[in-house]
């Protein structure tokens, strides 16, 4: 997978987007976007794939966060008590 800057994308978007290889677009040296050629996919399938990838990434971040904070070790009873407390506060 190759990369290009936002400025390079602005100057050569047509060439970059017509390439079959995926491109990581960086802004100030940090990855910002990924351009993937979807010409051989159904548009709705491509959108679904992108949404699923974002959801999987969010879930992985939440899991890492819960492990880092120790929340992966709480009991079912503690979870039920927390849910009950939130519902009672409504």
Image: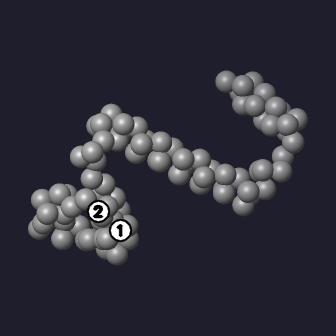
Q: Position of residue 32 (x, y in %)?
A: 35, 62
Quadrant containing the C terminus in the rendered view: top right
- Please name the colour scheme applied to the rendered image: one colour
Q: Within 10 angstroms of label 1, few (less than 14), some, or many (20 or more) residues?
A: few
Left or right: where 52 falls relative to 81: left
Q: Quadrant of residue 14?
A: bottom left
| Disc number for residue 1 | 1
Q: Quadrant of residue 46?
A: top left
Q: Which residue is mark 2?
A: 21
Q: Height in image: 81 above or below 54?
A: above
Disc 1 vs disc 2: Cβ atoms closer than 8 Å? Answer: yes
Q: Nearer the viewer, residue 87 or 27?
A: 27
Q: Earlier in the sequence, mark 1 or mark 2?
A: 1
Q: Position of residue 11 (x, y in %)?
A: 11, 68
Q: Residue at x 67, y 52 (%)?
A: 63
Say what secondary structure mark 2 lies in: loop
Q: Residue at x 18, y 71 (%)?
A: 8
Q: Position of residue 4 (x, y in %)?
A: 26, 71
Residue reaching furthest bottom? 29
Q: Height in image: 89 above or below 13?
A: above
Q: Residue at x 88, y 35 (%)?
A: 77
Residue 18 in view of the camera = yes
Left or right: where 47 falls relative to 72: left
Quadrant containing the N terminus in the rendered view: bottom left
Q: Nearer the viewer, residue 32 or 37?
A: 37
């Amino acid at each position: 997978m190759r990369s290009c800057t936002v400025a390079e994308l602005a100057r050569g978007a047509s060439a970059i987007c017509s390439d079959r290889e995926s491109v990581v677009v960086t802004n100030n040296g940090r990855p910002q976007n990924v351009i993937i050629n979807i010409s051989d996919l159904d548009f709705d399938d491509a959108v679904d794939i992108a949404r699923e990838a974002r959801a999987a990434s969010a879930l992985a971040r939440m899991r890492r966060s819960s492990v880092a904070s120790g929340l992966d070790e709480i009991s079912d009873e503690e979870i039920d008590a927390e849910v009950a407390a939130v519902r009672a506060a409504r």
